[in-house]
Image: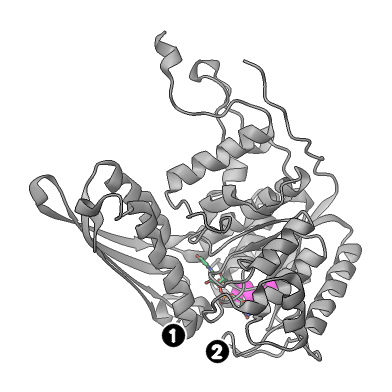
Amino acid sequence: MPVAKQFEISPAEGKLGVLLVGLGAVSTTFIAGVEAIKKGFAQPIGSLTQMGTVRLGKRTENRVPLIKDFVPLAQLKDLVFGAWDIFPDSAYDAALNAGVLEKELLGQLKEPLRKIKPMKAVFDQNYVKRLSGTNVKTGKNKFELAQQLIDEIAEWKRKNKCSRLVMIWAASTEIFLKTHAVHKTIDSFEQAMRDNHKAIAPSMIYAYAALKSGIPFANGAPNLTVDIPALMTLADKNKLGICGKDFKTGQTLMKTIIAPGLKSRMLGLHGWYSTNILGNRDGEVLDDPDSFKTKEESKLSVLEYILQPEVYPTLYKDFSHVVRINYYPPRGDNKEGWDNIDIFGWLGYPMQIKIDFLCRDSILAAPIVLDLALFLDLAQRAGMKGVQEWLSFYFKSPQTAPGLYPEHDIFIQLMKLKNTLRHLRGEDLITHLGLEYYD
Ligand SMILES: NC(=O)c1ccc[n+]([C@@H]2O[C@H](COP(=O)([O-])OP(=O)(O)OC[C@H]3O[C@@H](n4cnc5c(N)ncnc54)[C@H](O)[C@@H]3O)[C@@H](O)[C@H]2O)c1
């Protein structure tokens, strides 16, 4: 069989700067984890780029390299971290405050973590009502704030001697915003920034600054951010990758693992009730109804897309789906997510599934941040631009091309991701047909 054309992928030479918006629980757990792995204290558990493999060719060929040996990813030793936050705490103090990792482990990582001091944030309390901080930029209007970010990024890159950068939004969830007329074109977006228009949220200002600076951007929260025509056009025009929204961890991760399984066996669903208790700052922000609305939209859409009630009305028409998040401080980052799933089987007989997931939100999110940073950088070096749908695997609300419905089934998402890697390297795509083994 002729080998498909390989993409030209420029090598991962020099340092990769990972710019994090928000230096909270997720970001500090990610940075501390990478530093711990670099020192040999820990393994990169949960990271597909570090631990995953990819099968190549036929099952009889026994070619199963590690993903990191198959595609040229940046190495952990070459990562440099920068961040913005509304609080001036270093990554060390912020990690202590987040309370995810043990003090003893953080003590061993004090030196690299102390060095990471957040730059002043672009922040407006109208978009995150439960927070206020002092480490915040001031400027005449939103356009000027974007210019400040652009200058700061260039200076940071120079000072840290980075050859490439990626930016990831891991800051608090903003209030729910819908696409507005000013989001339509780059011109209307820029004018709206000059007019301090309320349809331009701080997350959009960071994304704009990244795309103007030639940096791919990933959105880890459910905010609209880069999912608007103006910024999608800008990404395309500047040949940059973008992806989002909302890291897929915890309860939604479970949903996208279990729902495809129920559907594969044609089991019906009467309802799925999900509730959570969590006590970290994210939980506090999500206690505000406007921020929760953004999260709720992101969490609710998953089942509809996976179960396709319009295709399978007998099984999935009109099922109830409820999602609740309750802020409960004693739990900190150690969330508890309960699911009650009312299903039905043969002859319509009802059954129930109960899940009690004692999870650790940031422990699940940190490897996602690492993989996104490395894969976005790979995509950039391979000349892939615009929405990176192959990274849907990592998101609750995957961003797609306009008009295209998102794929939520985690197994399809993983196949898509691995086939994209095979495609980049000119390997045959795996279809799982396998008839040739029986010829
Ligand atoms: N942990 C998870 O499993 C998970 C999953 C999906 C999505 N997320 C999202 O990731 C984000 C981060 O989660 P977290 O648990 O680290 O929250 P966190 O509250 O610990 O950290 C967020 C940080 O962002 C800062 N911030 C807020 N607005 C900012 C701005 N405009 N500029 C710079 N900094 C700003 C806050 O001060 C805070 O330190 C949240 O939006 C959360 O909803 C987390």
Q: Quadrant of residue 426?
A: top right
- Element carrying mark 2: loop
Q: Which residue is mark 1?
A: 289
Horizontal and vertical percent position of residue 160: 87, 62
Horizontal and vertical percent position of residue 214: 81, 60
Tell whether position 72 is magenta: no
Asked whether 38 or 24 is in front, the reply is 24
Alpha carbon separation for disc pair 2 and 1: 10 Å
The structure's colour scheme is one colour
The residue type indicated by label 2 comes to: Lys
Tell whether position 95 is magenta: yes
In the figure, is residue 337 to the left or right of 153?
left
Q: Which mark is residue 129?
A: 2
In the figure, is residue 366 to the left or right of 202?
left
Residue 83 can be seen in this image: no
Label 1 crowding class (10 Å Cα cut-off): few <14, some 14-19, many 20+?
A: some
- Count how many numbered circles sit on residues in the image: 2
Q: Quadrant of residue 95?
A: bottom right
The residue type indicated by label 1 comes to: Pro
Q: Which residues are magenta?
A: 91-96
- Element carrying mark 1: helix
Q: Quadrant of ligand 1?
A: bottom right
Asked whether 392 or 117 is in front, the reply is 392
Residue at far top of view: 439
Residue 65 sits above or below residue 76 on the image: above
Q: Which mark is residue 239?
A: none
- Quarter holding the C terminus is top left
Residue 402 sits above or below residue 124 on the image: above
